[in-house]
Image (tube, helix red, strand yellow):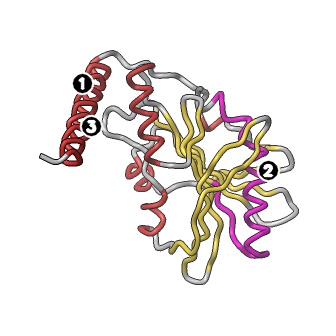
Amino acid sequence: MSLNFTHSLVARFTFTACLLAGSLVLLQAMNRAEDIPHPVPLTRFPVQVGAWQGVNVRLDPREIAGAGVHDYVNRSYNDGAGEPVQLYIGYYPTQRTGDTIHSPKNCLPGSGWIPLRSGERAIPVKGETIHVNQYVVAKAGDTAVVLYWYQGRGRAVASEYAAKFWMVTDAIRRDRTDGALVRVWTPVVDGTPQAERRAAEFTQAFYPRLTPFIPN
């Protein structure tokens, strides 16, 4: 038997053993009572954010049911100096029972929006830097800039895989799986750079206000 083949077998065995051990620990955690926070309802999220004034936008009940979201806010904000910015926050107090956060990466094409460009972006916000997903999307002649990320238990995470990793980790360590999807949307009317700047500036304005509504 070759040395490389032996190393390969050892590596596979080690990976399988770690996977099984992690699964056992997770199952034990899932059998414990979950610590479910009781944050401030998102209906009380500030309507006034700096110079931005918000107006509630009603969601179709089928969209709410499809998302399986427990609490949400969907609001259009405008500072009177340019195009509006739409903010959606969907909160899940637990993700153990089947209702999990749906990735916009899948929902956007399902709604007819075609991604033209995508990537991650770093945004400085009050003493820290958060990493978010940034998409430029198009549909029927309209173009928009979309920022989104997963927020919960003290973290802002761009990657859905990292979000799931931390959800499992916190289920084991803290008996918590609560979290939220945060999405910022603005039309591209005055140029893509301006729309990207507007989305980032609005994010910087509202992000420090999230904690009472999405617990750390």
Instruction: Please give the label number shown on residue 15.
Output: 3
Check whether the beta carbons of the residues at disc 2 and disc 1 lie within 8 A of each other.
no
* Location of the C terminus (image quadrant): top right
- The amino acid marked with disc number 1 is Leu
Residue 205: x and y, percent?
79, 45
Residue 95: x and y, percent?
38, 35
Quick one: 131 or 206, which is closer to the camera?
131
Which element is circle 2 on? strand
State how many labels appear. Answer: 3
Q: Is residue 179 above or below residue 24?
A: below
Quick one: 147 or 26, which is closer to the camera?
26
**Where does the magenta region start and end?**
184-212
Q: CA distance from mark 3 to mark 2?
A: 52 Å
Q: Residue furthest bottom?
A: 141
What residue is pinned by disc 2?
Answer: 53
Instruction: Please give the label number shown on residue 24.
Output: 1
Among the two numbered marks 3 and 2 on one chain, the one whose residue lies closer to the N terminus:
3
Q: Nearer the viewer, mark 3 or mark 2?
A: 3
Residue 213 is covered by the magenta coloring = no
Q: CA distance from mark 3 to mark 1?
A: 14 Å
- The amino acid marked with disc number 3 is Phe
Among the two numbered marks 3 and 1 on one chain, the one whose residue lies closer to the N terminus:
3
Residue 42: x and y, percent?
60, 37
